[in-house]
Amino acid sequence: MKRVILSVAVMAAMGLTSCKSETKKVEEITTTEAAKEIAMTDLSFGVRGNCGMCKNTIEKAANSVEGVTDANWDKDKKKIDVSFDSSKTDAMAIHNAIAASGYDTEKVAGNEEAYKNLPGCCQYDHEMMMNQSGEMKSDDHSNHDH
Ligand SMILES: [Cu+2]
């Protein structure tokens, strides 16, 4: 009989504890979501291309993704720097948009039809090296250099 009372007491205590921690959890989620609304992410990844016209096409494609606020492709490094609102879009959406315009990215091969329709000077070499800045750092921008 004593044991029954004891386990009831334990259960009641556990119930209280879990109730408390649940309330706390809800608060944490709300905070995270609020922070996420203004979460800007900077990202760099390799994109193949040749010239200034390529630059326009690549940047236009990246900027066409909702949530992208800034896109700058470096012709020499074969690399794009993008800033985007991570609550509105993600890295893959940007890769896909650039690939759809005919350009290869680190992760997505350029659309062949779009590539064929590019001006002759823009039909870059598919074997071209892309600057991947050494490592795959898709989300980590703690060691960003500007
Ligand atoms: Cu070009």
Image (spheres, rainbow, N blue to C red):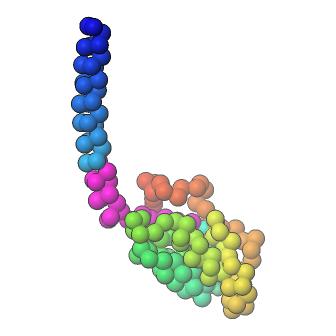
Q: Is residue 140 left or right of residue 55?
A: left
x then y, percent, for residue 104: 66, 73
Numbered circles on residues, count: 0
Most foreground residue, 129 or 106: 106
Residue 5, above or below 110: above
Q: Is residue 34 left or right of residue 139?
A: left
x then y, percent, for residue 127: 76, 71
Most foreground residue, 20 or 113: 20
Please tell me which residue is depicted at 39% across the width and 65% down the height of the picture. 87
* Ligand 1 quarter of the rendering: bottom right
Is 141 within the magenta? Answer: no
Whether residue 48 is visible: no
Quarter occupied by the N terminus: top left
Please tell me which residue is depicted at 27% across the width and 19% down the height of the picture. 8
Residue 53, image quadrant: bottom right
Which residue in the rendered view is the most extreme toward the top?
2
Q: Which residues are magenta?
A: 28-45
x then y, percent, for residue 102: 66, 81
Residue 74, above or below 4: below
Whether residue 15 is visible: yes
Residue 57, image quadrant: bottom right
Please tell me which residue is depicted at 27% across the width and 53% down the height of the picture. 31
Which residue in the rendered view is the most extreme toward the front?
1
Quarter occupied by the C terminus: bottom left
